[in-house]
């Protein structure tokens, strides 16, 4: 691989979350086909992480590609203030029909960070429209909610946002709930709720993605939501990663008895075809904006709000997601993950295996026993690329989040390569 594209890339392009050094190793992907990405040399890679968790039905899925092409010659985009279009309206109607029943309105944006940003602003102004200046948010330790200032603020403070720390607004972080600490957390929260101006509680429901696929019990989250409801604190589920089948149910909120007031969606929303974000809310939130007072308007919007092509992709992706075939695939992946987790969990290189729905994560022991782990799992991506698989580490954790069209054979290939990788870690 030494093409002009790579040369120009190195000369002109700045990649996300990528350490900028004089010579960077990137791969030039020239084609997507189902579960595979294909580079300029014709090497095929199984996209085991769905290109940062966005792809649901495979790359260049012909059904979605056709729907998008049709939309492109019908209406590519139009202003969404004072105007509307069938794709956005149809998707809103269909999405609200499958979300928890309390969700009544949808606000479109462009990505996960903006979906969260909208949720934060929607919550703060929900209070200010009622002349209640509540502005403090509660979030989980290790949380990741995006890269804009609002979403960084509510996320965990770490190396990713050190440089911006002084500019981030104050947020109270609480640990993930366990059977052991739940009472203590509830006591602390109740005290905060009665003494401070707490606006809302935001969480990644039952799986914290970027933190390393940390999982916690739905029942415990239910208890926290219930407490928030008691104190009128707005609850926000960031389902940017967990939405659209990832956890085995359509939405992680489907595991909850107490439904959140606001839900943030993006990533899989278009099947990985187009950038799109959505923030949905219940009647209670919306009603605070329903007013004759113009200052109660939610003054937020992006030029590409509800982009018609993106909404067409979302409708097409939803068509596929709601088919029986897709449901069966999700069940198959989930069952295979469970079986592999059982097989591998006692491997000496592993500290823990976590699994929920189509997500499986492997936490490596970071002890001296293991060879080249001192700088995190640096060699991991290269090892798997050499074996035709795209995987990336999150600290000491790596994970599979595959497109739902993956086959048993492809999954077995990934599992086998993981087992070999773990064995080599011990040598
Ligand atoms: C990825 C992610 C985001 C941010 O989404 P972007 O589209 O990358 O801005 C927000 N919240 C969660 C839970 C995510 O996984």
Image (cartoon, helix red, strand yellow):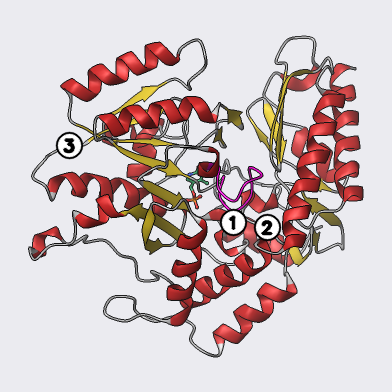
Q: Residue 79, image x and y in percent?
A: 34, 79
Q: Does the magenta stretch include residue 182?
A: no
Precedes in sequence: disc 1 or disc 2: 2
The Cα–Cα distance between marks 1 and 3, rounded to whole angstroms, is: 32 Å
Q: Is residue 339 left or right of residue 175?
A: right
Question: Which residues fall within the magenta stretch?
Answer: 242-252
Crowding near the residue tagged with mark 1, few <14, some 14–19, many ≥20 C-alpha atoms within 10 Å:
many
Crowding near the residue tagged with mark 3, few <14, some 14–19, many ≥20 C-alpha atoms within 10 Å:
some
Q: Residue 268, image x and y in percent?
A: 59, 56
Q: Residue 343, image x and y in percent?
A: 87, 25
Q: Is mark 3 on a helix, strand or loop?
A: loop
Q: Is mark 2 on a helix, strand or loop?
A: loop
Q: Which residue is drawn at 70% across and 47% down?
A: 49
Q: Residue at x 66, y 73 (%)?
A: 64
The answer to whether residue 131 is above or below residue 183 is: below
Foreground pick, 55 / 202: 202
Q: Do the residues labelled 1 and 2 touch (CB within 8 Å)?
A: yes
The answer to whether residue 1 is above or below residue 393 is: below
Q: Residue 56 carries which label?
A: 2
> Which residue has dot 3 on it?
134
Q: Quadrant of the N terminus?
A: bottom right
Q: Is residue 422 left or right of residue 147?
A: right
Q: Residue 227, image x and y in percent?
A: 33, 27
- Asked whether residue 206 is in view, the answer is yes
> Which residue has dot 1 on it?
268
The quarter of the picture where residue 155 lies is top left
């Amino acid at each position: 691989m030494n093409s002009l594209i790579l040369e120009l890339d190195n000369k002109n392009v700045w990649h996300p979350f990528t350490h900028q050094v004089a010579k960077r190793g990137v791969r030039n992907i020239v084609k997507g086909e189902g579960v595979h990405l294909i580079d300029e040399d014709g090497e095929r890679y199984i996209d085991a992480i769905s290109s940062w968790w966005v792809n649901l039905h495979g790359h260049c899925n012909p059904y979605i590609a056709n729907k998008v092409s049709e939309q492109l010659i019908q209406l590519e985009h139009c202003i969404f203030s004072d105007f509307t279009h069938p794709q956005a309206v149809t998707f809103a109607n269909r999405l609200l029909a499958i979300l928890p029943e309390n969700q009544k309105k949808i606000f479109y944006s462009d990505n996960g960070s903006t979906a969260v940003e909208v949720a934060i602003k929607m919550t703060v102004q929900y209070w200010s429209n009622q002349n209640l200046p509540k502005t403090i948010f509660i979030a989980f330790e290790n949380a990741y909610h995006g890269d804009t200032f609002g979403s960084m603020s509510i996320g965990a403070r770490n190396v990713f946002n050190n440089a911006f720390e002084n500019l981030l607004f104050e947020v109270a972080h609480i640990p993930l709930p366990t059977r052991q600490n739940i009472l203590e957390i509830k006591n602390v929260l109740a005290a905060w709720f009665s003494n401070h101006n707490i606006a809302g509680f935001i969480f990644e429901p039952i799986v914290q993605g970027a933190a390393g696929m940390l999982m916690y019990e739905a029942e415990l989250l239910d208890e926290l939501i219930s407490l928030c409801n008691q104190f009128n604190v707005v609850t926000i589920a960031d389902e940017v990663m967990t939405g659209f089948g990832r956890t085995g149910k359509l939405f992680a909120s489907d595991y909850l008895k107490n439904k959140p007031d606001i839900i943030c969606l993006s990533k899989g929303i278009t099947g990985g075809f187009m950038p799109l974000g959505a923030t949905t809310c219940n009647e209670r939130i919306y009603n605070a904006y329903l007013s004759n007072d113009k200052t109660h308007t939610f003054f937020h919007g992006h030029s590409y709000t509800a982009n018609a092509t993106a909404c067409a992709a979302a409708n097409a992706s939803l068509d596929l997601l709601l088919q029986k075939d897709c449901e069966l695939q999700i069940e198959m992946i989930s069952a295979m993950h469970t079986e592999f987790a059982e097989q591998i969990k006692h491997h000496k290189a592993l500290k823990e295996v976590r699994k929920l729905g189509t997500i499986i994560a492997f936490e490596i022991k970071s002890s001296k026993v293991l060879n080249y782990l001192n700088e995190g799992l640096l060699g991991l991506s290269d090892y798997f690329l050499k074996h035709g698989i795209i995987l990336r580490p999150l600290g000491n954790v790596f994970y599979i989040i595959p497109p739902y069209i993956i086959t048993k054979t492809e999954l077995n290939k990934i599992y086998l390569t993981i087992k070999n990788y773990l064995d080599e870690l011990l040598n």
